[in-house]
Amino acid sequence: MAISRRLLMRVVVDTSVFITLDRIGQIDLLRRLFGSVVRPQAVLDELLAGGDTQPLSDAVTAADWIRTEANPKGASLRPELGRGETAAISLAYESEAELIILDDLQARRVAADLGLRVTGTVGVLIAARKEGCGPDVEEAIRLLHGAGFQMSADLLVAFRSI
């Protein structure tokens, strides 16, 4: 039996992706697609800090397939990026991750400028759909909308075209 290349990838995930996938009941897609993922401590700190106002499932905070690593030392990219985004991008860059998953447009641009391969929540849903393990497109759009997820008209058209 061949092992999927995706299961051997080092994948770094930012806060918003965990929150959105958890809100729509699809957090397990990360495990199904990649086997395990990595987040810096700053991302876990952000997830735990928001837990009082918007509780998250245990899968987001304590799953054994989500590894938490130390924040990169001296990580500073741009002042407009949040602490979690900065740590995630720096960790992905320093550890030569094959993929970083983040949604913030500014953070995505910074990551791409550093030569990182970038996707977001919608990219995860598209990959899962193509692998046959995610919700159908219209259901995913409905779930994202219900969770308050914002997406551009261009992204919506691209998503519907898969």
Image (cartoon, rainbow, N blue to C red):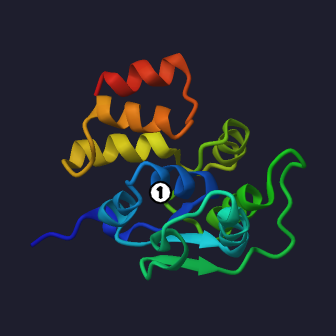
**Rendering coords of residue 133 (x, y %):** 22, 52
What residue lies at 41% left-to-right and 66% top-to-bottom? 9
Residue at the right extreme, as displayed:
79
Counting from the top left corner in percent of width and height, residue 25 is at 39, 54
At 68% from the left and 70% from the top, the residue drawn is 48
- Toward which corner of the image does residue 13 lie, by quadrant? bottom right
Residue at 40% over, 23% down: 158
Give the number of callouts: 1
Is disc 1 surrounded by few (<14), some (14 to 19) or many (20+) residues within 10 Å? many
Quick check: 12 left or right of 4?
right
Q: Quadrant of the C terminus?
A: top left
Where is residue 49? Give x, y as percent. Answer: 73, 67
Question: Looking at the picture, does residue 17 appear above or below residue 50?
Answer: above
- Identify residue type, mark 1: Asp
What residue is shown at x 30% (from left), y 22% (from top)? 161
Asked if 9 appears above or below 62 in the picture, the reply is above
Q: Looking at the image, which is closer to me, 107 or 94?
A: 107
Q: Quadrant of the N terminus?
A: bottom left
Left or right, 74 with reference to 132? right
Q: Is residue 136 above or below residue 83?
A: above
Q: Is 156 or 143 nearer to us in this picture?
A: 143
Q: Nearer the viewer, residue 102 or 2?
A: 102
Instruction: Identify the image quadrant of residue 89.
Output: bottom right
37 left or right of 78?
A: left
Residue 32 in the image: state x and y as whole percent: 30, 63
Left or right, 151 with reference to 41? left
Camera sees residue 51:
yes
Q: Circle 1 sits on which residue?
A: 22
**Secondary structure of residue under mark 1:** helix
